[in-house]
Amino acid sequence: MSDLAASIAGRLADVRGRIAAAAARAGRDAASVRLVAVSKTYSADHVRAAVSAGQIDFGENKVQEGLQKIADTADTTIRWHVIGHLQSNKARKAAEAFHWIHAVDSVGLLTKIDEGAAAAGRRPRVLVQVDLAGEATKFGASPDEVPGIFGRAAELHAVDLAGLMLLPPAVDDPNDARPWFRRLVALRDQLMASGVPAARLAELSMGMSHDFEVAIEEGATIVRVGSAIFGERR
Ligand SMILES: *Cc1c(COP(=O)(O)O)cnc(C)c1O
């Protein structure tokens, strides 16, 4: 095994162990948490090393970089996630190539992804990004806009709305992210109480390298972890 492969395998094992421990603390099954290895800025060789260590789900925040890596690893059976905001002119390409799309924040974008997926015969799962903090610098639908997006679900042809995604304000202490995770869970519960089917709210994509354990304690079903697996990005 190369040094790169050994170090990525070791870090992955560590992250998986921490996921299992956090799930156990919350009385959850570790299998209810999907680990997305965020490979942005890292090479296809890094991705291959993680695949060799059993990793299946990978995330990229830019469509163009992701498409290149998908092409470079076409011999694998990776499930690709696009986790960053999509410009609407990239919606079609994303729908053609990615299995999950995390950061949909408008009906217009959702419609474009649906059209692209239908034309390509694909069925991506889509999450609605919520901007709970009202941060002007961040993407995401405000909590008020979210019901309107889910209201369109019945009209979609090719996209499965599958839940919510959160990128909370950056904090030093992971515990300070906990209130944001709780608020996303509360919003999910509120949407369910208002009649959105549970299957469209099954997933909560929240938690990154510095706070994924807290996110799992609060109910994350998908954690997006980059640097803890691949090392600090330059
Ligand atoms: C980069 C990124 C991550 C992973 O960040 P790390 O701190 O490296 O784990 C997760 N989610 C999104 C949306 C990102 O852009």
Image (cartoon, grey):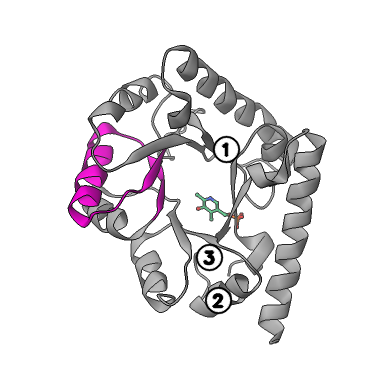
Judging by the rendered image, the residue that carries numbered circle 3 is 39
Q: What element carries label 2?
A: helix
Q: In which quarter of the image is the C terminus?
A: bottom right
Q: Can residue 211 be seen in this view?
A: no
Residue pointed to by mark 1: 169
Amino acid at circle 2: Arg
Comparing marks 3 and 1, which lies closer to the viewer?
Answer: 3
Q: Does the residue labelled 2 lie within 8 Å of ligand 1?
A: no
Q: Position of residue 19 (x, y in %)?
A: 73, 49
Residue extent of the magenta highlight = 99-128
Does the beta carbon at disc 1 come under 8 Å from ligand 1? Answer: no
* Mark 3 surroundings within 10 Å by alpha-carbon count, few (fewer than 14), some (14 through 19), many (20 or more): many
Residue 223 in the figure: left or right of residue 132: right
Which dot marks residue 48?
Answer: 2
Is residue 115 in the magenta section?
yes
Query: Could you give the CA–CA distance between mark 3 and mark 2, rounded to whole angstroms?
Result: 11 Å
Q: In this view, does 14 lie above or below 51?
A: above
Indicate yes or no whether the magenta region holds residue 183. no
**Three-letter amino acid code at disc 1?**
Pro
Instruction: Classify 10 Å Cα crowding around label 2: few (below 14), some (14-19), many (20 and above).
Output: some
